[in-house]
Amino acid sequence: MAEIFSIRVVPEYLVAYRQNSSGMSRNAEGMTASFAVIMSRVRQRNDDLPAATFRWSGGYFYLYLADKCYDWRDYPKCLRYLKEAISANPVLLLKAGIYKTFVKSVFNPVTRPTSKGSERASLHSKRRRKRPFILNAIFRHFELARWSAASDDGA
C-alpha cells in the first residue's frame, strides 16, 4: 500500500478486528509464513531500505506473536517468538515487559493450570495502570533516536 498511496500517522483508531479460533489471527505459524513472504517481496522491491528497518519490523512482529501466544497460553511458542524478537532487534531487551513475559512463560505451565477464571483475572490485571519502569523510558529513548536517525537518512 505504501508503494501506491501516501501513508500518515493519525492519533486515533481507524480499524479494529476480532480474533476467533478459526481465523488467521490465531494462527502464529501462518502469520509467520505470511510475514516472511511479504518481507521477501518488500526487500526485492525496495533494495534501498536499510537492513535495520527489516530487523526492527521483525523484532516487533515476533514480539507481537510472543504476546499473543502468551495470551493463548501457548508458552513454548511464546518463548520461541521472544527469542526470535530479541534476535531480530536486541534493543527490545530494554523493554521491561519482555522479562515479565519470559519469566511467566517459563513458570506458568508449572505453577498454574489454565482456567477461564484465571484468564479473566489476567485480562483484568492488564487493564490496571502501572507505574512506568525506568527501563521502558530508556527503551523509548533508544527507539526514538533510531527512528529519528532513519527518517533523517530518508528511510
Image (spheres, helix red, strand yellow):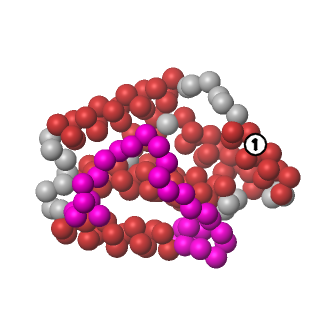
Q: Quadrant of residue 114?
A: bottom right
Highlighted range, magenta: 1-29
Q: How many marks?
A: 1
Say above or below: 137 vs 104: above
Looking at this view, name the residue that lies furthest to the bottom: 22
Q: Quadrant of residue 32?
A: bottom left
Q: Residue 101's spot in the image, x, y percent? A: 62, 45
Residue at the spot x=41%, y=51% of the render? 59
Q: Residue 46's spot in the image, x, y percent? A: 18, 62
In depth, the one of 86 and 31 nearer the eye is 31
Left or right position of 14 against 25: left
In depth, the one of 90 and 32 nearer the eye is 32
For residue 20: magenta? yes
For residue 90: magenta? no
- Tell me which amino acid carries mark 1: His
> Mark 1 — residue?
124
Is label 1 in a helix, a strand or a loop?
Answer: helix
| Residue 85 visible | no
Q: Residue 118's spot in the image, x, y percent? A: 82, 50
Q: Quadrant of residue 100?
A: top right
| Quadrant containing the N terminus in the rendered view | bottom left
Is the residue marked by circle 1 packed among few (<14), some (14-19), or many (20+) residues within 10 Å? few
Left or right position of 55 against 30: left
Residue at the spot x=37%, y=69% of the render? 36
Residue at the spot x=39%, y=43% of the render? 10
Say above or below: 48 vs 32: above
Residue at the spot x=83%, y=57% of the render? 116
Is the magenta region chiefly helix, strand or loop? loop
Q: Residue 121's spot in the image, x, y percent? A: 80, 45
| Residue 22 visible | yes
Left or right position of 30 against 22: left
